[in-house]
Amino acid sequence: MTWIYLFIIKLAGGLLSLINLFLKRGKLKDFIEGRNTQNLSVPLQKTAQRYWFHCASLGEFEQARPLIEALKSKDPGISIVISFFSPSGYLQRKDYALADAVIYLPLDTPANARKVLNYLNPDHVVFVKYELWYFYLSLIHQRQIPCYLISATFRSNQFIFSFFGSWLYRLLPKFTRIFLQDESSYQLLEHKGLTNIQLSGDTRYDRVKEHALKVKLNTHIEAFKADSPLIILGSSWQAEEALAEQLLQDDSFKSFKVLIVPHDISLKHIDTIYNSFKQYGASLYTDNRIPEGSRVMVLNTIGHLSSAYYYGDIALIGGAFGKGLHNILEALSFGVPVLFGPNTGKYPEAALAMQSEVAMSISDAASFKKSINYFLPKQHLGNDLKAKCIDFINWHSGATEKVVKVIEEK
């Protein structure tokens, strides 16, 4: 099967080079040209122990970040290098202060694996969550470099556990240690006979907990909220935005305001959202003033979502009406209960949050409104719900410390 995999990878590489000739701009062009223009031929200078972290995108980086910062705090002299697969991760974190180098990970071929490992010359390797790159991991194992998979989750119906995915499954014993988010993943791998596994939890809990303590107040969002209940759409897609519009049309929610933080902040998409909510006095975050009677603000910048959650009463987190749920933990760390669509099977934190009664899954406008009416009085009658959300984060924190302890032993 590996030769089929390699054929597909090389075919994809050739097609991408051809497609690039016709692209003018966009994420795909960044994906291709970012790899084509980086020079990995001269090994990166090394004067200390080096840790290589590979993250698919920005979300995985947020899982790696607590570990990076903990290791740097214990030994400021170590070298950190980070690789990304996606442009969204690379472009937003290419200047990350704690990294000596940030690169795009070339496609998974034996030649690229040799080139990257010779360039980085790592002493420890950390892959995040789902990252299983056959030729990279095989060469790391061959060179006897300690390698860890952190914040990982597994489900019995994944391709890796099928007959056709067995070649990929054989990578799992090659990890020095696999740190798992949830009990079901641990039981699954234990049943498969793996012994290099540990139930640690998700490092994102540590990240959001620390970040909430350092939040900067945002007077612009505070002025927009005023005394109104505020619903925040975090990393929203069209489905969540449509629900917000139906809420605003309902007179029983006429005192509510909505802050929309879209997943896609391209000028075209921001303009579409703005025009859709114009009748509610929509404003952009970057506007100098808030129109009188405005009930909608569109956050058209990067980096202000955390400070926005500080002012929220309820958060509707995007993605779960489609294929993937965005980060619900950030809102909860500020004491804000969360709502999301029905497709959350791949996200253990969603099930845990619902079990702890700080989150609800919704399916339509009716369940959206019903959930708001359930949560909102609890927010305004006291701090019990807020404390419950924060306690949920605190209870599940601590994964970073467990991972650091194991790495330090190597």
Image (tube, rainbow, N blue to C red):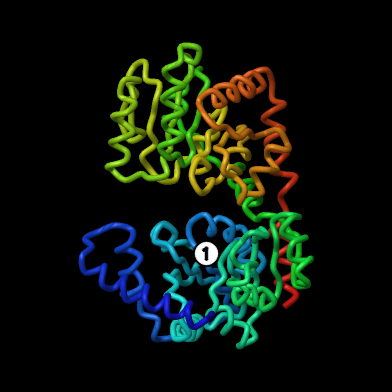
Q: Where is residue 322 in the image (x, y as percent from the top left)?
A: 48, 44
| Nearer the observer, 178 or 242 | 242
Q: Where is residue 252 in the image (x, y as percent from the top left)?
A: 50, 12
Q: Where is residue 228 in the image (x, y as percent from the top left)?
A: 50, 18
Q: In this view, does 245 lie to the left or right of 229?
A: left
Label 1 sits on what residue type? Cys
**What residue lies at 35% left-to-right and 44% top-to-bottom?**
265
- Within-10-Å neighbours for mark 1: few <14, some 14–19, many 20+: many
**What residue lies at 49% left-to-right and 38% top-to-bottom?**
234
Q: In which quarter of the image is residue 406?
A: bottom right
Identify the secondary structure beneath mark 1: strand
- Location of residue 379 with respect to 108 vertically, above or below: above
**What residue lies at 39% left-to-right and 29% top-to-bottom?**
297
Q: Is residue 372 left or right of residue 268?
A: right
**Residue 298 shows in the view:** yes
**Residue 45 shows in the view:** no
The residue pinned by badge 1 equals 55
- Location of residue 285 with respect to 4 vertically, above or below: above
> Outermost residue toward the top?
251
| Nearer the observer, 88 or 39 | 88
| Nearer the observer, 169 or 297 | 169
Quadrant where the C terminus sits is bottom right
Q: Is residue 336 left or right of residue 219?
A: right
Q: Where is residue 332 in the image (x, y as percent from the top left)?
A: 62, 38
Count all numbered tags in the image, as a single digit. 1
Quadrant where the N terminus sits is bottom right
